[in-house]
Image (spheres, rainbow, N blue to C red):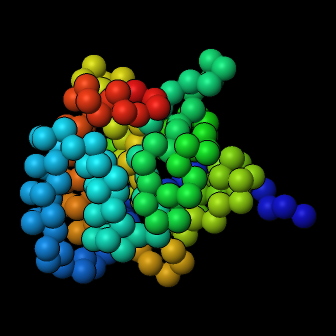
Amino acid sequence: MEEALVRLSEVIITPQILGRKSRGYSQGFDDIYQVLNGKVEGNDLSALQDICDAALKFCFAESVALSLLGYINDEPVFNWEVAAGKAAALVGKIYSPRDNTPCGTALEMYSYQVFRHPERHYAWVRENGFVVPEMITMPIYKEDMQSFGTFWLMHAEGKHFDKEDIRIISMLLTLINKALRKKAFRKALTFS
């Protein structure tokens, strides 16, 4: 018998991240950030993939993705546009609903959210067989504050995000926002 879905408050653990011990400053990240910034400034379309790869490496994540909001049959969905790690095999093959998903919740709350086993609350996550020990979702908005998508990372069982991850992800998100405001990048994406 399948377990009933739990309340959202039982899977959101965002406040806990501030109390976690940080692993300390990530050596080498600032150098990579400057390289990535140069790629975005130069309209190098590989920059978004490189940003996902950097998040995977420096946050020790299992999966990273940039999910952009679009429409299929007039229904709002997220398309996994660019990804690294385990999620990379699903780029362009999976569309998650806008509502009732961790990404949708981050957009609704206008701030990053940290989840522990969100499949316990979100039916879509569970129905698609995803087991997500821990996940961070960072909302992305257009200049007019319209929803654009999310940048998200997942950890494997036994690993946890900390304040250093928030710093790294936030810095990478500034590059994603800069890239998504450029026509060359938007033209290369499915949903833009």
Q: Residue 136 at x, y = what percent? A: 41, 57
- Whether residue 19 can be seen here: no
Left or right of 1? Residue 95 is left
The residue lying at 14 percent from left, 77 percent from top is: 27
From the viewer's side, name the closer residue of 121 and 149: 149
Check the image and report above or below for 100 versus 152. Answer: above
Q: Residue 3 at x, y = what percent? A: 80, 62
Left or right of 41? Residue 54 is right
The residue lying at 18 percent from left, 43 percent from top is: 40
Q: Residue 125 at x, y = what percent? A: 65, 52
Picture quadrant where residue 4 is located? bottom right
Left or right of 4? Residue 132 is left
The residue lying at 54 percent from left, 78 percent from top is: 157
Check the image and report above or below for 33 versus 42. Answer: below
Name the quarter where the C terminus is drawn: top left
Circle count? 0
- Whether residue 130 can be seen here: yes
Left or right of 145? Residue 9 is right
From the viewer's side, name the closer residue of 148 and 160: 148
Picture quadrant where residue 95 is located? top right
From the viewer's side, name the closer residue of 172 and 138: 172
Q: Residue 181 at x, y = what percent? A: 23, 29
The residue lying at 90 percent from left, 64 percent from top is: 1
From the viewer's side, name the closer residue of 91 and 156: 91
